[in-house]
Amino acid sequence: MKQSLSLATAVLSLATSVNATQIITPTAASTEVSAGSNVVFAPRYSVTAPDNGAETGLGLRVHFNANAVDFKGVTSPFAYGLQPIGEVTADTDDFDADPTTDRYVILAWVDLTAQWPGADELPLALGNVLFQVKSGFSGTTHIRTSASDTANGTALQSTPMTLTSVAAAPPAVLLRGLLQGAYNNSTGLMRDGLRASALISSAQPYASLGYSGGETTMLPLLNTTGADAPVDWVLVELRDKTTPQTRLASKAALVQADGDVMDAATGSTTLSFASVSAGAYYLALRHRNHLGVMSAAPLNLSATPTVVDFSQASTAVYGADVRITQGMVLLLPTGDVNHDNKLIADGPDNDRNTVLGTVLSNASNPGAHTNFQLHGYYPSDLNLDGKTLYVGPDNDVNTLLANILLSPQNSTSSTNYILPGSLPQ
Ligand SMILES: [Ca+2]
Ligand SMILES: [Ca+2]
Ligand SMILES: [Ca+2]
Ligand SMILES: [Ca+2]
């Protein structure tokens, strides 16, 4: 290395060209970066008359700030006259007159016959100098060049490349899911009875599931009817790719009648998770009285939204699939009134009794009638029509009971079978 550079120096100082300028221009003069970004500094070379493109070579220092970027190597260097790539060196003499660029590497080309860079047309691509942006870098930094050697009498004119940090775009999903309790097989939509009865709260209701986020929604969205009408709040979770019990990000959102999950504040069906970086996560969809589902495997999420449709059989889910098939779609099963990730119709902690208890104990039902219709937003309203009903048409327990009796895992069709949810707890 040392020898070849000495050679370069010796040869270059013998050159006779005058009044020419060697010019270095980066292919991209500026770029936006974030932690982990790969940066390609691609210098292009040209030279002014009178040299007509023939020189004894060029020694080029590429200066950078080691607190901002790591040097990763050089690819596709221009081959004619190429010397071995230099090591990363401290810029103690500050050759580029920028104290923030504290390191450099040298790229050098030598031609004993002073015909460099040969027959290639100018401007000439000198190669790709690769850097990676360090985590924690913010602000602006530059990649500059200076000449360790130019042909004698020539000057080097160079343009720096400017790197400006921007926040990394958060990972996003386009998520769909259908809630059994509200689903109408003949329309293919979920009912919006909670919305129509003005029972959907403006603030997210998942404190009961241990989620304390500040998501809110407002009237224009809550007044939407038809396929995009809000049905209810749901909870979307990104979970750790190796320990899926661990929630890394949660977002309360609204599910539309057609199954699209939308941002409660904006109505956008692109759900972004600003608190985490792009990467691999399990994605879970939960509802306050339905069993939740989660992707079968971690999904590689990035700023380009990943489409996940839990209503389709082609979307595999984690664990034993608890989704209910209805026609061409799969539904999240209703019935988990007491949020324990199980459907139980008989015995301790059973969901059916919780529906009955809610009806009997309500102050507006002083006579404790089992056929009382309790209006309001309750977990016991398993079909999401705005009322809790224990007996009679449209009651809230028959579907719960059917889910237990018809479960493929309940081979004896026992009412005391405990149907476990598939979400890791
Ligand atoms: Ca410097
Ligand atoms: Ca929609
Ligand atoms: Ca339960
Ligand atoms: Ca109901």
Image (cartoon, grey):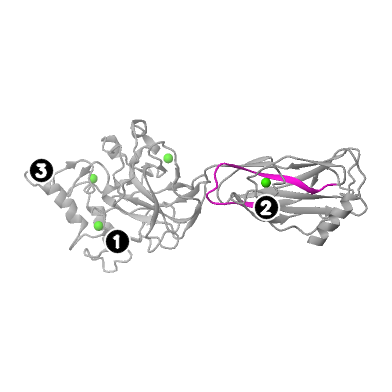
Specify the farthest residue to the left.
367
Nearer-the-camera pick, 51 or 14: 14
Dot 1 corresponds to which residue? 406
Query: In terms of secondary structure, what is the magenta stretch mainly?
Result: strand
Residue depicted at 73% across the width and 55% down the height: 75
Residue 26 forms part of the magenta stretch: no
Mark seen at residue 365? 3
Q: Which mark is residue 130?
A: 2
Q: Which mark is residue 289?
A: none
Q: Is residue 100 above or below residue 298?
A: above
Hey, which quadrant is residue 74 in on the image?
Answer: bottom right
Residue drawn 44% across and 53% down?
312
Q: Which amino acid type is marked by label 2?
A: Leu
Residue 136 in the magenta stretch? The answer is yes
- Is mark 2 in CB contact (under 8 Å) with mark 1? no
Element class at badge 3: loop
